[in-house]
């Protein structure tokens, strides 16, 4: 089970979550070329270890455990998976 970044991240891209992720699952980082063109950050579901460290530091409450994503943002599950070329469950 991965964590998912949802709509509140769009346009904000606060990278506090990047700094606390112990497995480097959140991208793009500020050092990556696609950071400027990306509308939000994404969590790689294959890399995420479900530790939840990112959820508590997000200043806009955009990060949820995959099974706890609010109904209005369920499409962000697919968006996060597809960002990494993966098929959502």
Image: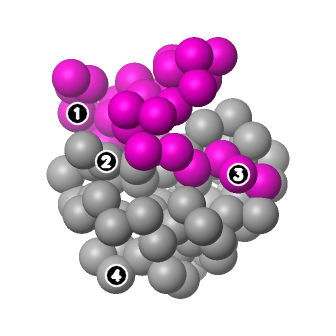
- Above or below 67: residue 62: below
Q: Look at mark 1 in the image and give the residue it sits on.
A: 86
For residue 86, which quarter of the picture? top left
**Residue 2's mark?**
2
Task: Determine the residue positioned at 55% across, 61% down.
Answer: 55
| Mark 2 closeness class: few <14, some 14–19, many ≥20 residues within 10 Å | many
Q: Look at mark 3 in the image and give the residue it sits on.
A: 61
**Residue 22's mark?**
4
Task: Determine the residue positioned at 61% across, 61% down.
Answer: 35
Question: Residue 15, image x and y in percent?
Answer: 65, 71
- Above or below 74: residue 5: below
* Mark pair 2, 1: CA separation: 13 Å
* Mark pair 4, 3: CA separation: 19 Å
Counting residues from the start of the chain, the first of labels 2 and 4 encountered is 2
Q: Is residue 34 left or right of residue 53?
A: right
Report if the CB atoms under discs 2 and 4 are less than 8 Å apart: no
Question: Can residue 30 be seen from the camera position used here?
Answer: yes
Task: Determine the residue positioned at 77% across, 54% down.
Answer: 60
Q: Is residue 84 left or right of residue 77?
A: left
Question: Residue 27, image x and y in percent?
Answer: 47, 61
């Amino acid at each position: 089970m991965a964590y998912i970044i949802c709509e509140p991240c769009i346009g904000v891209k606060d990278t506090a979550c990047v700094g606390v992720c112990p497995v480097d699952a959140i991208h793009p980082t500020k050092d990556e070329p696609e950071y400027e063109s990306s509308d939000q950050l994404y969590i790689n579901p294959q890399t995420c270890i479900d530790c939840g460290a990112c959820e508590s530091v997000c200043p806009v409450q955009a990060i949820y455990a995959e099974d706890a994503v609010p109904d209005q943002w369920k499409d962000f599950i697919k968006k996060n998976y597809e960002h990494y070329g993966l098929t959502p469950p």
